[in-house]
Structure formats: C-alpha cells, structure tokens
Image (cartoon, rainbow, N blue to C red):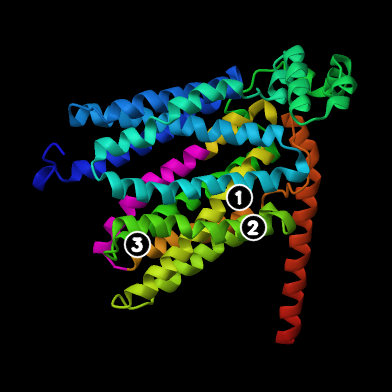
C-alpha cells in the first residue's frame, strides 16, 4: 500500500494514531453537540458520516487522503458510541438498565469475531473497508425511526415532543393504558424542578465546578484512561507472540463473552463500584504475573494476556454504563465525551510506553499494571448507582450523593482508626 516500507514503514502505525486522534476529537465535539442538539440527531449524523467517509476510504488515491478519511471516520465512531449509550441509559427503566446495557455490548464482541472472518475472506484492505462501512448506509436510514430522549426533550423546553415520544414508545410496548395516564400536565409536574434548572447553560466547566461532580469527574478520568491504557497495552503484548492475526482477532472477541457474562452478574448483584474496581485490579494482577513468566512459555503468557484483556473488556462494559448513570441529563453527553476523551488519550499513550522496553524489558508492563491499580482503587471512591434513578440536574447529583460520600468517607476513617488501634495493641503500645 503506497510502498510503505523501509523508511516509510512507521507511517503504517501513524495512520492508526491518526484514526485514534479522530476518535478523541469526536468524543470532544460530539459530546457537547448532542447535549445541545439532541442524541438522535447526532447519532443519525454519525451513522451518515461513518458510512460515507468510511466508504470513501476504500477509494483513497493517496496516503494523505486515506489518513484524512480515517480521521473523520474515527470522529463518527465516537459519535455513534456516545449517543447510543446515552439513549440506552435515558430510555431503559432502572431495573433493566444493567441487563440491556451489558447484553448490547455483546454485539461489539460478535462484531470483532465476524471481522476476522470477513478480513480472512477478502484479504484486500479496500474491499474490507467497503464491507465494513457500507452497511452503515442501512443503519443511517433506519436510525430515523429512533425516538429522541424524552428526558432531553423536556429539559430543553420541548415537553410536547417528549409527550409524543413517550406515547409512541408506550404503544410500541403495548402499554396503551399508559398513553391516557401521561399528559402534558403530569409530565411537567413530575419534572418541574428539572425544567427550572434546565434554563441554565452548562459547559464542560460544570463537570468540575461543584464538589461531588468534581470528585466524580476526577475519578472517571483515572478509570477511563487506565482501562484504555491497560487494554491497548495488553493488545500490543499479544501481538509480540507471533500468533496468526485472524486467529488473534477471534480470540480477542471470544474472551469477551465469558468476561462480559461475569460482569453482568457482578453489575446486577454487587453493583457498579465493586465491579469496576475489581476488574481493573484483576487486570493489573494479570499484567504483573506475566512479568515473571519466562518468554519461552508463550502459550501461558498468551493465555494470561488474553485473560487480562477480558478483565479490561469487562471494565469497559461497566464504565460506559456507570458514567451514564453518574452524570445528570443536562450535561450527560458532555460528561461522556469528556470521560471518553481520557480513554482515547490512554490508547494513544499506550504505544509510547513501549519505548521504555529499551531501558528495562519489564518496565512497560509495570507502568500498565500500576495505572490499572491506581484506577481500580480510585473506582471505589465513586458513588454506587445500582437501582438508583437517573439524576437530571447537577443539583440532583449534589443532593443525592454528597451525604452518601460523606458517610463512606467516615466509614473508611473509622476502619482505618480501628486498624491503627489494633496495630498498637499488637505492638503492646
């Protein structure tokens, strides 16, 4: 492809970095735009952009054109991910949100496995781009059938449209009696406080302005960055073992199935906070164990790396759901975009750490593992959202979780004091 060999060989990796830069840019831009113009509109546009520019990539006449199309395709991918997550979170009832959110992530897994078969069958990269991106034209057409988030419509002064969407969804679900019960007066009365608060203009600064929102955002920075950082670190470790690329793609997808099933059970019964922290700490444990496995034991090293990849995939499943439940409706997409940006920075930083291999071979793994440990511990500082109604305003977040976080801090302090007292007793002081 354009004779990218010898001196030009690094340009192959550069194209992937440019693509991830597009994903990062899309997270920043589409996150804020969808809070302003709606989830459905931005999702439909993202499908269209992905279909058109992804298809154009297959006909790129030069390396520069290829990288340009890949950059804007990456932006569209962010738009699709962020807006589908928000629509799921804002439409699905509290009791079934975990199940739906986890099960929908399996389609990402199946896509990974199908991609291996498609790539093996086509071989040519231009045909592969066409096969992967052209189906999004169909997705773009049926996305017009989607319902805009009723929460977003109400909070943006479009209660009449929100009522129409609620009635439409009720009819689709066969809940015809609900249509008569939900009126414009009932809807506005139910969300009166949220409607008053929504008259304010919110920016990314509001993610850090108040105490609880600031704690949530800072913790999510660590969790998103480290999850992506460890994920790509493990992925690059797998590539060193010389396993067939198509087989590795299937393995990458297959390991997600048991990992996400375990995550589903943990999310449903143990909660988001414990699941998030455990998955990150488990991936760190696997990364550190692999440091001590001799390099000639490739099968064992590969198995451990794949296991670690499964833990980070489960962490991704949790963090998307967790983040959507932590941020309020008025700024949810801005928050999702902000947090997702940290993941893209992590994915771009992961390859740079490999340079440390020249200093000390185990150093990259130590860095990946340490980041996962820090994020795993940080995850336990987040409030629990299992079976908790979605917050709609920043005030909701502050009122709902400030007391709970204070009690959690007090509990941690009491336990620390008890352990200190026990230690003094054991020392005879």
Q: CA distance from mark 3 to mark 1?
A: 23 Å
Relative to residue 415, is residue 313 depicted above or below? above
Q: Which residue is mark 1?
A: 318
354 in the magenta segment = yes
Q: Residue at x 64, y 28 (%)?
A: 331
Mark 3 neighbour class, 10 Å CA radius: few under 14, some 14 to 19, many 20 or more: many
Distance (Cα) linking label 3 and label 2: 25 Å
- From mark 2 to mark 1, how far is it between C-alphas? 7 Å
Q: Is residue 301 above or below residue 324?
A: below
**Residue numbers of the magenta segment:** 340-361
Question: Mark 2 or 1 closer to N-term?
Answer: 2
Q: Specify the quadrant of the image occupied by residue 396.
A: top right
Residue at disc 3, secondary structure: helix
> Which secondary structure lies at badge 2?
helix
Tell me the element at label 1: helix
Please tell me which of labels 3 and 1 falls first in the chain: 3
> Mark 3 or mark 2, which is nearer to you?
3
Name above or below for residue 58 compared with residue 382: above
The residue depicted at 59 percent of the width and 28 percent of the height is 205
Q: Position of residue 398 (x, y in %)?
A: 75, 36
The residue shown at (47%, 68%) is 286
Residue 91 x %, y %: 70, 32
What label does residue 417 carry, if any?
A: none
Q: Position of 429 compared to 185: left or right?
A: left
Q: Which mark is residue 238?
A: 3
Callout 2 touching callout 1 (CB < 8 Å):
yes
- Identify the residue shown where x is 67% and y is 49%: 382
Q: Is residue 107 left or right of residue 265?
A: left
What residue does disc 2 label?
275
Crowdedness of circle 2 by 10 Å Cα count: few (<14), some, many (20+)? Answer: many
């Amino acid at each position: 492809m354009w004779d990218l060999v010898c001196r030009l060989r690094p340009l192959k990796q550069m194209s992937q970095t440019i693509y991830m830069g597009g994903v990062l840019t899309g997270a920043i831009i589409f996150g804020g735009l969808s809070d302003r113009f709606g989830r459905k509109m931005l999702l439909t546009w993202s499908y269209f952009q992905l279909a058109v520019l992804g298809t154009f990539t297959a006909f790129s006449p030069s390396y520069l054109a290829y990288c340009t199309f890949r950059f804007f395709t990456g932006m569209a991918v962010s738009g699709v991910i962020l807006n589908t997550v928000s629509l799921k979170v804002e439409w699905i009832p509290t009791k079934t949100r975990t199940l739906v959110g986890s099960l929908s992530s399996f389609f990402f897994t199946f896509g990974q496995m199908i991609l291996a078969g498609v790539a093996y069958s086509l071989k040519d990269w231009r045909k592969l781009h066409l096969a992967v991106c052209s189906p999004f034209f169909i997705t773009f057409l049926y996305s017009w059938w989607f319902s805009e988030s009723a929460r977003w419509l109400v909070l943006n002064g479009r209660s009449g449209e929100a009522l129409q969407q609620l009635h439409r969804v009720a009819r689709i679900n066969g809940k015809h009696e609900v249509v008569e019960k939900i009126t414009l007066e009932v809807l506005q009365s139910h969300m009166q406080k949220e409607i008053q608060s929504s008259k304010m203009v919110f920016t990314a600064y509001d993610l850090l302005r108040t105490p609880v929102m600031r704690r949530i955002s800072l913790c999510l920075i660590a969790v998103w960055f480290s999850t992506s950082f460890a994920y790509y670190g493990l992925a690059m470790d797998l590539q060193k073992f010389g396993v067939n690329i198509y087989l590795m793609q299937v393995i990458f997808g297959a390991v997600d199935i048991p990992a996400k099933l375990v995550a589903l059970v943990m999310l449903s019964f143990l909660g988001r906070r414990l699941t998030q922290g455990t998955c990150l700490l488990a991936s760190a444990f696997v990364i550190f164990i692999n440091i001590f496995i001799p390099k000639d034991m490739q099968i064992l090293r590969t198995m451990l790396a794949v296991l670690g990849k499964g833990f980070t995939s489960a962490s991704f499943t949790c963090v998307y759901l967790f983040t959507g439940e932590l941020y309020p409706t008025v700024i949810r997409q801005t928050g999702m975009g902000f947090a997702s940006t940290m993941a893209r920075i992590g994915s771009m930083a992961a390859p740079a750490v490999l340079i440390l291999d020249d200093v000390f071979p185990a150093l990259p793994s130590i860095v990946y593992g340490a980041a996962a440990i820090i994020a795993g511990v940080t995850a336990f500082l987040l409030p629990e959202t299992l079976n908790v109604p979605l917050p709609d305003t920043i005030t909701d977040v502050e009122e709902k979780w400030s007391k709970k976080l204070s009690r959690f801090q007090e509990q941690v302090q009491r336990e620390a004091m008890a352990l200190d007292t026990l230690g003094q007793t054991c020392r005879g002081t």
